[in-house]
Amino acid sequence: MKDGLLTERQMEVLRYRKQGLTQQQIADIISTSKANVCTIEKSAMENIRRAKETLEFLYTLDATHLCTIPSGTDLFNVPAIIFGEAEKINVKVKYDTISLINRLRESRAQACKARVVCEDIIVYITDQGELYFV
Amino acid sequence: MKDGLLTERQMEVLRYRKQGLTQQQIADIISTSKANVCTIEKSAMENIRRAKETLEFLYTLDATHLCTIPSGTDLFNVPAIIFGEAEKINVKVKYDTISLINRLRESRAQACKARVVCEDIIVYITDQGELYFV
DNA sequence: CCGGACTTAAACACTTTTCGTTAACTTTTA
DNA sequence: TAAAAGTTAACGAAAAGTGTTTAAGTCCGG
């Protein structure tokens, strides 16, 4: 059994960064160039992003397609749409209006511009009322 | 920007499996051997495990070390130890006694045998009272 | 005990990732 | 603005991961 996605080098850099060290300081400590520290940190972040996306996929496997929010929809209308669709299939959404919008904003930030949805958003829901946006 | 950890092949197999197909049926559909379906599914599960472990690492970066539960401790004494340590640093743990034990069992199953902790368990905590066991 | 479902190991060709260098570039901050 | 911090691009070598085959397993219900 292997560890997670991150290499020793990547974890090392992330830990030093968390302590507030600059890339140059870390480069000195681990004896390499600051450019290399930058790329190691970057690939670490990329790996973390991929880990998150992998689990998102897993969730959509468990969930069923609920509806699709068309691009151009007012953000504040989204909860009503989702509550309505969930009611049709007898599932209680585990978010209220505000937290639903926050959940959406967090998971699909680039799809939310100001008060408007600027990309089609596919909505999945589990039996437990958990939502996933793709 | 690339996708998550899973390859097309791996997602394909997981989706078919979710539908309840056997490895042989999937092998026929995607034109390969059932042994290969098995290894693809296995590496998919391994990737998912690694994705989870990667995020766990990320959480421990945000969290501070709270205490270490020594091997041999009675499971039912663990909550009291953790509540005590958390109180010392003025953090409210977001679990009650029962759910804390469940959380521990889920995250470190192999470290819990019957009523006893059989490995040292390092406990991390965030400002929000979330716990991580390593 | 037979058969179906599943697992495992070794070996292979192939692709991707990683760490590293150098050098130029942009952004932030004092 | 000047210095420090951070980013990017191009490239190479080494390491790791993937899909595949073949062949030999285990595990379990009927």
Image (spheres, coloured by chain):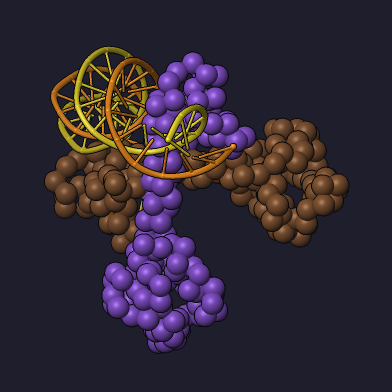
Chain colours: A purple, B brown, C orange, D yellow
Q: Is residue B108 visible?
A: no
Q: Is residue B103 visible?
A: yes
Q: Is residue A2 above or below residue B1?
A: above
Q: Residue at x 39, y 27 (%)?
A: A35
Q: Residue at x 29, y 69 (%)?
A: A119
Q: Residue at x 68, y 49 (%)?
A: B126
Place of residue D1 in the rendered image (x, y in percent of width and height, measured from the top left): 42, 35
Q: In which quadrant of the rendered image does the C terminus of chain B lie?
A: top right
Place of residue A63 in the rendered image (x, y in percent of width and height, measured from the top left): 40, 67
Q: Is residue B52 above or below residue B129?
A: above
Rendering quarter of residue C6:
top left
Q: Residue at x 34, y 59 (%)?
A: B18
Q: How many marks?
A: 0
* B65 left or right, relative to A50: right
The residue closer to the viewer here, B32 or A75, is A75
Rendering quarter of residue B92:
bottom right
Place of residue B12 in the rendered image (x, y in percent of width and height, measured from the top left): 25, 52
Place of residue B120 in the rendered image (x, y in percent of width and height, measured from the top left): 72, 32
Rendering quarter of residue C18:
top left
